[in-house]
Image: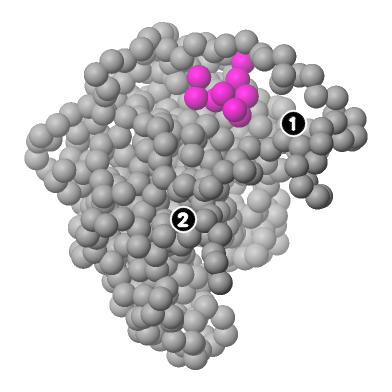
Amino acid sequence: MVLPNSFIVLWTLLFVGFAEPQDTTSSTSTSSRTSSSSSSSSSSASASSSAVGGGGGGGGASSSARATPSSSAPATRSGLPSVSHGSFSGRPSTTGALRASSVGTGIVVGGVSPAQTTYPSDGQLHDAEPAPYTPGGGLGLNSTPIYNAQSDFDYQSLALALYQEWIELDLFHFGLATFSDSDFEEAGLSADDRYLIQFMAEQEIGHATLISNILGAEAPQQCNYNYPFTTVREFIDFSQKLTRFGESGVYGFLPHLNSREAAQLLLQSISTEARQQLIFRQFNGLFPMPIWFEVGVPQSWAWTLLAPYISSCPEGQTRLIWQNFPALWILDQPNPARVNASQGFNETLGAGTNTLNSTGITGSAACLNQTGGNDCSPAITQNRSIPLSYPGRQVNLTWDTPGKEVGPNNSYITSSSAGTAAYVVWVTQLNVTYSPLTLSGNSSGSTIQPDLETFSGDPAINGTMFIAITDDDPYLTPFNISLINEHVVAGPALYQSG
């Protein structure tokens, strides 16, 4: 049988990757799943260590029988043999984002081409069919797919996505290894739930392998990390927020990749991450999907949120070009651990993600195992009687000034080219909306949560969404959202609006 060229190119990508040596995990492991209390935070766990369906969950339950994996299956790339956790101490050998030898002053936006507005859109065919049942038009249909980076934009965007996959791989393992079975059960999460988190870690092995094979020998390696959480509830909230900006960061650049082939594969992995984010919302006792559209954000927004949790990386690690903006705190971030989430003040575990702090929230103030519409126990869905936020709510903010060392080995420096802080931008679903900022100091102020809908019946500000401090209110849409970067004073931060 003669295989089509496109099949050969994709199979080569998946199976052999690149000739340079990489550590790989065995694709023939038959180890059974383990309880969360004995799970290792090592990221070199097998890519498929147990059956997915049937049988019990984790926590020592026996695995269902599974077929022996094919010896011809593509090998996976492993992370570090042992990932360490904690803050970085020392001095960086290199500082600042990656820079080219020549740097322009800004992206020049052109006009609208007439060809973009002349198609009739009347439901009729206006061109010959290149093949039966195939309308005229489309891109890439007559080319042999090559799954590689085709520009610096491609490489740096995919490298950012790989940094994200590596931390998720470690995060899910680390959470399972850090907390005992009884800790998870007190938070309402069963052995089956814990195994689902383990399986999400296994998904990340596949995602990291895919992107590494696209990028080649200099693809970023896994790093060491520093997480803020100390309870299961905080781990779950941190995970749903981390997967939120990981997913949104890819949506922001996906349509701009030169390599449409790489974009296709990345879309098929980030769609899995969208499901992970929904599941962590369910584990957090939140309504699983309170929005009609997912949101996309610029790469520098995703990197700003991710970098503070990377303590150090291996020597010679591929560096990123993306900007790190000054950190933004939401002082009255809605706290999903409370019956009335809006009553909390200064209950987060840091800036950026503004992860909930569950310590000290007990009794009638805590929503876990409450009755009626006040319950926030893990569930397929929860519809809380008291909303987490609401239009007209005052939101109090404070932010860093530029010049702080952040990220791997403290080797990146926060910066901003914006002017005086004047607005809060709300980036959610399809909307980029601004509200006036009332300053109360050089780096603090407040705003009022806007009241708007994406379409009638869909409150735009809902779910886990993004805000930032800006100096202006330029009109932007999902496709050109990255043009906001020159106006960002501080942020983004994740606002837990619903």
Circle 1 sits in a helix, a strand or a loop, which is it? loop
Residue of label 2: 9
> Vertically, is 197 above or below 239?
below
Q: Position of residue 107 (x, y in %)?
A: 46, 14
Q: Amino acid at mark 2?
A: Val
Q: Observer-nearest residue: 479 or 399?
A: 479
Residue at (46, 74) in percent of width and height: 195
Image height check: is 397 above or below 194? above
> Looking at the image, can residue 448 be seen?
no
Determine whether 198 is above or below 382 in the image.
below
- Give the amino acid at mark 1: Glu
Q: Is residue 477 magenta?
A: yes
Q: Nearer the viewer, residue 397 or 420?
A: 420
Q: Residue at x 22, y 27 (%)?
A: 96
Say few, some or many: other residues with alpha carbon within 10 Å of mark 2 (under 14 / 14 to 19 / 20 or more).
some
**Gap between marks 1 and 2 measured at Cα:** 45 Å
Instruction: Examine the image and state in which quarter residue 496 appears.
Output: top right
